[in-house]
Image (cartoon, rainbow, N blue to C red):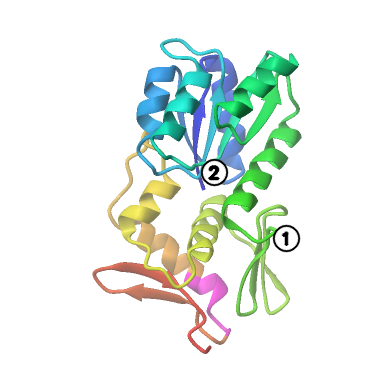
Amino acid sequence: MRILLVEDNRRLSDSLKSILTEDGYVVDPVYDGLDAEEMGLMDVYDLIILDVMLPGKDGIAVCRELRNKKRAVPILMLTARDALEDRVMGLDSGADDYLVKPFEMDELRARIRALLRRESGPKSGSLQISDLILDPATHTVMRNGQLIELTAKEFSLLEYLMRHENHLITREMAENHLWNYENLVMSNVVDVYIRRLRRKIDEGHEPKLLETIRGAGYRIADKSE
């Protein structure tokens, strides 16, 4: 899951990025409204965390412009303003949720999970293909009732594949959702993670779920159906 984090307080931004990265999200930080609008229009994000008070262009105007350009990405607004009219203004501009500073990190995590579930997952939040079950809320993966240990990056890649069951995921698409723009990755790094996932979730199990489509990309599907 890829998040655009728009927060001009560098200290808070660095802290949020560090925590969310540890949670398995890919985080691109920007620090002003003009950059936020440009990045938000790229259509590669699963969620935008958007501060209201920003240099260049405020978060309300950025949110309104993204909605005017038909960007449906979930937007969670952050602000120190807790007056009712400010919350109403944020929601009326097109935000999906509104969180007042200071906030507890656990609450931010819960709101992120809720928005991502609302956008692309079942109400329970769990994803299932055959006997493979991934739960984003508890960050656990099980197959045939057995717990599978995954790294944060492996978990993120598997979640991305499962949210796009039966769809071809190209190497570029996987890279865009697993690494931010500050990090360059080797051309075969996604293949490495796919091999690790295949070893952990497919070896010793039937049916085989992970498929590499030569020259095209990857797909996860229950081909026994």
| Depth order, front residue of 44/61 | 61
Q: Quadrant of residue 201?
A: bottom right
**Location of mark 1 (residue):** 124
Q: At label 1, which amino acid type do we have?
A: Ser
* Secondary structure category for the residue under label 2: loop
Considering only order in the chain, which callout, 1 or 2, is on the residue closer to the N terminus?
Answer: 2
Task: Find the magenta span and give its range.
Answer: 198-205
Q: Position of residue 224 (x, y in %)?
A: 52, 89
Image point (69%, 34%), residue name: 108
Vertical comparison of 146 with 33: above or below: below
* Residue furthest left as drawn: 215
* Residue furthest top as drawn: 55
Image point (68%, 46%), residue name: 114
Residues packed near mark 2 inside 10 Å, few (<14), some (14 to 19) or many (20 plus): many
Q: Position of residue 177 (x, y in %)?
A: 43, 48
Give the Cα distance between marks 2 and 1. 20 Å
Query: Looking at the rendered structure, which numbered label has been put on residue 55?
Result: none
Q: Is residue 199 magenta?
A: yes
Q: Position of residue 96 (x, y in %)?
A: 61, 36
Image point (59%, 59%), residue name: 150
Vertical comparison of 183 with 151: above or below: above
Vertical comparison of 142 with 49: above or below: below
Image point (59%, 41%), residue name: 22
Relative placement, left or right, of 186 versus 40 is left
| Depth order, front residue of 201/169 | 169
Q: At label 2, which amino acid type do we have?
A: Tyr
Q: Which mark's residue is nearer the viewer, 2 or 1?
A: 1
Query: Looking at the rendered structure, which numbered label has been put on residue 25?
Result: 2
Vertical comparison of 205 with 75: above or below: below
* Secondary structure category for the residue under label 1: loop
